[in-house]
Amino acid sequence: MAINSITNSVAAQRASTYTAAKTDHTEKKSESSTKTDTGVVYEKSSGQTSGTVTKKTDYALVNKLKADAEQRTSQLRSLVEKMMTKQGVAIGTADSMWSFLAKGDFTVDEATRAQAQADIADDGYWGVDQTSDRILDFAKALSGNDPEKADLLLDAFKKGFKEATKSWGQDLPDISQRTYDAVVEKFNKWKNGTEETEAAQTQA
């Protein structure tokens, strides 16, 4: 649960640099939208994988994805902070929290363990499928679903993954590597135009 949180958050921050060249007016508009969307939970719609290419950043979707990621990460951080406090561990920076988790030198109550297992399950919010889907959706929203930008945004994700590894302080857990592999695979399908074809075959 924890590591896919930082993988998702850091990768999203990296991918956000794609829009850094926008004008101040656009940035202010985006910031305003973020404030109004805070607390909105992102749920992928059935038409989300539409092949329509606009080549225009979908700021509404970007802001929803960012707000959702921030809210979920905040919930996770609060959970970890409570656990650390109960065990007499001082709460420092975000990096120190990830290092604390990476060491594994802590205990969790049964309710927290059950929630964590549900969150990283195959159908969980921090599971491989949902996390990789959100990262791809974020890239599509930033690029206006332009597959020509896939390599650029995938590179941003890979840089974010390296930063997450650095924050973790050691090799990331298996779930993170599986998420990484799933993201690369989904980006390649998007870039090569095979995403819709395979989805249709699966539904048939």
Image (cartoon, helix red, strand yellow):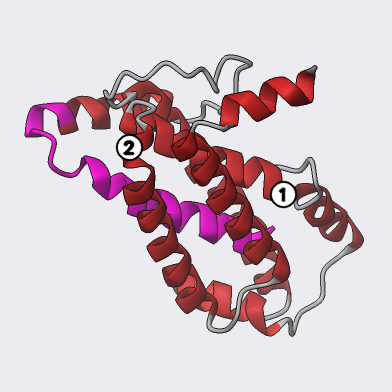
**Residue 110, position in %: x, y?**
91, 61
- All told, the count of numbered labels is 2
Taking the magenta stretch, the answer to whether it contains residue 20 is yes
Left or right: 138 in relation to 180:
left
Residue in front for this viewpoint, 150 or 69: 150
Q: Is residue 113 left or right of residue 50?
A: right
**Which range is magenta?**
1-26
139 in relation to 177, above or below: above
Is residue 127 visible to the viewer in this orientation of the structure? Answer: yes
Q: Quadrant of the N terminus?
A: bottom right
Give the residue at the far right of this rendering: 110
Please tell me whether residue 187 is drawn above or below residue 93 in the rendered image. Answer: above
Q: Which residue is mark 2?
A: 148
Q: Secondary structure at mark 2?
A: helix
Could you tell me which quadrant the C terminus lies in? top right
The residue depicted at 73 percent of the width and 78 percent of the height is 87
Amino acid carrying label 2: it is Glu
Few, some or many C-alpha atoms within 10 Å of disc 1 (few <14, some 14-19, many ≥20)? many
Nearer to the camera, 43 or 190 = 190
Q: Which mark is residue 127?
A: 1
Relative to 184, say whether 106 is above or below.
below
Magenta stretch holds residue 72: no
Question: Which residue is pictured at 54% across the width and 76% down the height?
Answer: 168
Q: Nearer the viewer, residue 11 or 203?
A: 203
Indicate the position of residue 95 as horizontal and vertical percent values. Answer: 47, 74
Vertical position of residue 140 compared to residue 156: above or below: above
Q: In terms of secondary structure, what is the magenta stretch mainly?
A: helix
**Residue 136 appears at what percent x and percent y?**
50, 40
